[in-house]
Structures are given as structure tokens and as C-alpha cells.
Image (cartoon, rainbow, N blue to C red):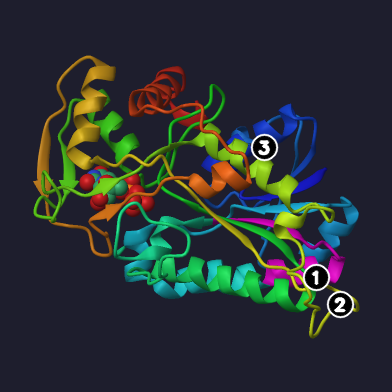
Amino acid sequence: MRILVTGGAGYIGSVSVEAFLAAGHDVTVLDDLSTGHREAVSEGAALEIATYTDAASVAHLLRRRRIDAVLHCAAKSLVGESMVDPAKYFRANVAGGIALLDGMRDAGVNRIVFSSTAATYGLPERTPITESDPIRPINAYGETKRSVEGAIRWYGHAYGLRSVILRYFNAAGASTRNGEQHAPETHLIPNVLAAAEQGRELTIFGGDYPTPDGTCVRAYIHVEDLAAAHLLALQATDPADSRTGATAGTAGTAGTAGALACEPLICNLGSGTGFSNREIATAAEKIVGHPIAVKIGPPRVGDPPVLVAGAQRAAEVLLWQPRHGTIEEIIESAWKWRRSHPNGYSG
Ligand code: UDP
């Protein structure tokens, strides 16, 4: 396949690019390097430094590189920031996402895998969450992802866009080559490890949630397992594959002549097991080999108390089996990457 990865210089995108290259695919990365890192893009991939938010230039690129399918990872993705600056999130994620979809229509590329999020579920009614549970985001970030999911669905019905929507539950860990480096860093595991490295206190946001130890509970997935899921998902968008194909007896009502109505395949990518923020700090202490001081700060606006899902549908339909199961493995890989990149990507 000839695959375009938006956000391929970012954390999840760069590890996915590694997986696609290893499987023998041709990879183009589209990234404006606003938050991504040039060094994160594997040598075998072509890097286009540009935005995905301009339909005409996306269409041009898709034609020039003769792209078959798109993995759309690029987005603004910080819950806290989305609450203080929702305009930035709607512009980049929603308006930008629609531009990408329109560029794809223009170029006749009708296969997409979309990086979505557990944040679309909001305050879940039950745990673990399943894909058919209600989608009621409680933060602007989750709302933007829900909006793009909706657009993809209707583009599938009207224009025959084949899609897999993957709702991630907290990506973490690292490959040997690529790891997590954001500025500012807001994610828990890198912040725990940074606190351990620098001998400073970790602040846990909120200690009064309705959870066993009062801190939020999340499920963590190794980023290499997400990359593997992306590859399986791209394969499921093949024109001959019924998993993302036409729903029986339906035909497109508008758009591409003869297009059949397609329904997105939506899969949670979770581990089934939640860990509280305190448990993550304790697990990290074992990996780094010394205590990590923890203090409880005020809760972060927009944080649901618990986000946990299994991956039954991904296992059954995509045949996805996570290989890096334990939280220790996940934290250890992140720790190893930090030790081997003491100055991050710029070092
Ligand atoms: N968190 C924390 N301290 C930090 C960073 C995160 O207590 O320095 C908490 C955050 O409030 C949430 C959990 O860790 O309860 C996971 O947050 P993260 O930003 O890693 O991922 P999210 O679940 O928001 O996607």
C-alpha cells in the first residue's frame, strides 16, 4: 500500500510509520512539525512538511504520491488546552479534518483510518466501555473528535468513504527508535518519569474522585500495539473487504457516481485493565528503582474519573492482539527510551 500518515512526525504517528515500513509499505508523512519532530520520521519514509488543513494541497499531494489510504493521526490533543482554547481545537481538528476529507474526495482516495479517542465517551455509564455506548464528550477535545467521526460516517454513506475509527485509551510506552516528547508535557507517564529523573515531586491532578484511591483511572496501551492496530485497520479498508464495505442493499445518495454507502468500523483500543494515577506512580517506582514523591493537586478541568475499555471488537474483527500487555512493560519501554535519548529528539 501507498500510505499517507498525517502527524507522522508525532508520537503515535512515528511509531506507526515504523510498523508500516517494516511491513513493506510505501509511506509518506504529512506533518507541519508544529508539535512533531523531524528526527522521529524513519529514513525510509518521505516527509512532506505542510499542513493537512488545506484541501487543494492535500489533493495535490495524494495524486503526486499516488496514495491508496490515509492514517489521520495529526490533531491537537490536549484536554486541558482544549478547555481554555476550544477555537484552536475546532479549527485544527474539525475544520482541518474536513479539509483533509475533501482533499481525499477530490483525489479519489476513499480509505481512511482515523485516530479517535476514549474522550468521546465522556462520563461512561458503565465500565468497561463498549463501542455502542453513548458518545457524550465532556471536554472540547473529545467533542472535536466526535465531530470528525460524524463527518467520516456521513462521507461513508454519501461518497463511499471506507473507514476505521479507532478510539484510543491512553497511548504510552516507546519503540526503540521513537518515544513521547511533548512541550509542554501533560501526559502522566512521561511526567512521572521526568519527576523520577529530576528528583522532583509529581503532581497528581485530583485525589477526590469516586475511584478506589480517589485518583483518576485510565487504561494504557503500548504505542507499538496501536501501530499494529493501525496496519490491520488500513487493511480492513481495502475495496474488497466487507468489514468497511457497503451495508447490504444500500447505495450512495449523493456524491461519487455509483458509490456504495459504507459504514465506519469503530473499535476501542483498550487493555481492559484500568490503573489509577497513584498506581502508575507506584509501578514507575519499581522500574526506576527509587521512590517518587507524589502530591495531590487540584483536579484538571475536563477529566473523567474513569476511562477503561476492552478491545473485544478489535480482537474479533481486526484480529488485533496487543503484545505488550503489562503496565510494567509499557513504563519500562518509555523509561528505556528516555535513558537512550537524554536530550530527547534534539540531542
Ligand atoms: N495526570 C496527572 N499528572 C500529570 C499528568 C496527568 O495527575 O502530570 C493525570 C490526568 O489528570 C489524568 C491522567 O493522569 O487523570 C491521565 O492523563 P493524561 O494527560 O496522561 O491522558 P488523558 O487521559 O488526559 O488522555
Q: Nearer the viewer, mark 2 or mark 1?
A: 2
Q: Distance between the residues labelled 2 and 3?
A: 30 Å
Residue 272 in view? yes
Q: Is residue 344 above or below residue 273?
A: above
- Tell me the magenta residue range: 99-115
Q: Distance between the residues labelled 3 and 1?
A: 23 Å
Q: Do the residues labelled 2 and 1 touch (CB within 8 Å)?
A: yes
The quadrant in which residue 151 appears is bottom right
Q: Report whether the residue tagged 2 is closer than 8 Å to ligand 1.
A: no
| Amino acid type of the residue tagged 1 in the rendering | Arg
Q: Distance between the residues labelled 2 and 1?
A: 9 Å
The picture places residue 76, in percent across and down from the top left corner, at 48, 59
Farthest front residue in view:
249
| Amino acid type of the residue tagged 3 in the rendering | Val
Residue beneath disc 1: 105
Q: Do the residues labelled 3 and 1 touch (CB within 8 Å)?
A: no
Residue 48 in view? no
Residue beneath disc 3: 17
| Amino acid type of the residue tagged 2 in the rendering | Thr
Q: What element carries label 1?
A: helix
x 80%, y 30%: residue = 24
Image-based side of 300 in relation to 149, left or right: left
Image-based side of 127 in relation to 293, left or right: right
Depth order, front residue of 132/123 = 132
First in sequence: mark 2 or mark 1?
A: 1
Identify the mark at residue 219; answer none if there is no mark.
Answer: none
Residue beneath disc 2: 256
The picture places residue 37, in percent across and down from the top left corner, at 57, 40
Q: What element carries label 3?
A: helix
Which quadrant is the N terminus positioned in?
top right
Depth order, front residue of 343/111 = 111
Q: Residues within 10 Å of mark 3 (few under 14, many from 20)?
A: many
